[in-house]
Amino acid sequence: MANLAGAEDAETPENALGISPDRTMAAQSASRRPSFGPILQPGVGPISGDHYLSSEVDEVLWGYVPTTRATPVLSMRSGETLTVDAVSHEGLLEDQGRDPVSFFAGKGVARHQILDDAVAIAAGYRRTPRNFDVDGPHVVTGPVRIEGAEPGDVLKIETLEALPRVPYGVVSSRHGRGALALRPDGTAPDGITLDEVMPPISTDGRSTGHPAEYGNVSTFTAIENGRAVMRSGDRKVSFPLNCFMGIMGVAYSDDAGLTSPNANSIPPTLGGGNIDISLLGVGSTFYLPVFTEGALFYVGDPHMAMGDGEVSLTAMEGSLRATFRLTVVKKESREAPGVAFHYPFAETPDSWIPIGLSDPDGAAHGQGSDLNVAMRRAVVNSLDFLEQDRGLDRATAYAYLSAASGFIVSQVVDRTVGVHGQIVKSHFA
């Protein structure tokens, strides 16, 4: 794959990442586009944060997120910045052979273009037993303790950078998962026929009990000239990158043990987690209510691009080096939206983003996956924000949402499904 090697060697007149050293971090983040110098192996290349966190095999969780009882791997002050080398799970999973060197070699990727931390995790992860059919797929890095954070506060998460560590990603579709998945009882979901199930039921090998024989589909996606490229025979499709972290969260479950169902990495919760909102890239701010001392921030599920809905199951999954500013917000400061003190909320430079989840309280009893519930919660959270933070009466706010705001399906594949709104800031200028 000459394009990958070429991407690795590309330099700009300024430096390998195209950033002039005399710009401020905010200006860098606003102008930065994903580009490539060297492959970003652990600790290699520019690290802009006050603190650096790598994904160590004996510290990450694979398939679970930290609970309120977790031991932090790093501590930092409020307002400081953190750079994380996040690892994508795609290419590491059991249905892909749990050997990223072999998996990616089969796609034409040379060994030096495969991340050492990904190889180490696939081969040496022992913190929890892996059950492919039960555990989440995600490699989760953290948690990080933020000094001064207490229950009742908000953690303000500003994404300053999101750089691809490698010039490729993977989009996967797995039997029994995704928008067109076969139901567990063998019937088609409402609205489609068995012939329309994806992946096709004729390729379903789950009865073998061996994940590598399940017949799941992983679509390799290269980055060429700054765009994602998929090939199908002599056809290709390319689309822009949009790098962001699918998982950003704080500890929420109070359960003991590392593999509590409430800590499974798949469903998002009130503590964030696998929120999968494509707007949460560089320049965005994500607000999460704090449930334990130190907040215990974690990340995972790095995305290089994602369509709203994430219908096949995954986004374009690919490892990222991301930098965040983490700030504790006290209620009396009024420096976070009021909704954020009890529910996830976000914003970009252009929009406020109220969020609704279908069943945000954890996985112990399964998840409700009714998009109507998620939609209603997104609308109620929007009304609360417009009334409490923007001063509109509730009837006017309701009318405004109907006339001028969009509500978008965040994702339909994480058991707990999500909807998010976009309230345009310029409407309130």
Image (tube, helix red, strand yellow):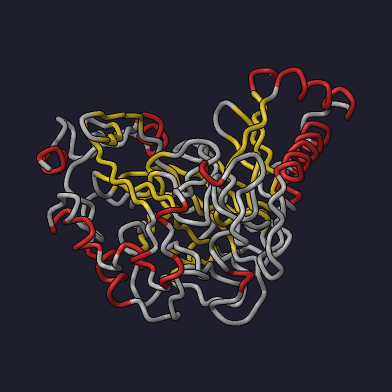
Examine the rendering and report whether any part of residue 99 can be seen. Answer: yes
Question: Residue 186: x, y in percent?
Answer: 59, 58
Q: Nearer the viewer, residue 267 or 10?
A: 267
Q: Nearer the viewer, residue 166 or 347?
A: 166
Residue 305 vs residue 112: left or right? right
Q: Nearer the viewer, residue 27 or 250?
A: 250
Q: Quadrant of the N terminus?
A: top left
Q: Residue at x 18, y 40 (%)?
A: 16
Residue 324 vs residue 342: left or right? left
Q: Residue at x 66, y 60 (%)?
A: 290
Q: Quadrant of the C terminus?
A: top right
Q: How many marks?
A: 0
Question: Residue 73: x, y in percent?
Answer: 44, 72
Q: Is residue 51 above or below residue 166?
A: below
Question: Residue 69: x, y in percent?
Answer: 60, 77
Q: Residue at x 50, y 54 (%)?
A: 247
Quadrant in the rendering for residue 376? top right
Q: Residue at x 52, y 77 (%)?
A: 71
Examine the rendering and report whether any part of residue 74 can be seen. Answer: no
Q: Is residue 14 above or below residue 95?
A: above
Residue 311 vs residue 162: left or right? right
Question: Residue 222: x, y in percent?
Answer: 25, 40
Quadrant in the rendering for residue 206? bottom left
Q: Nearer the viewer, residue 343 or 421?
A: 421
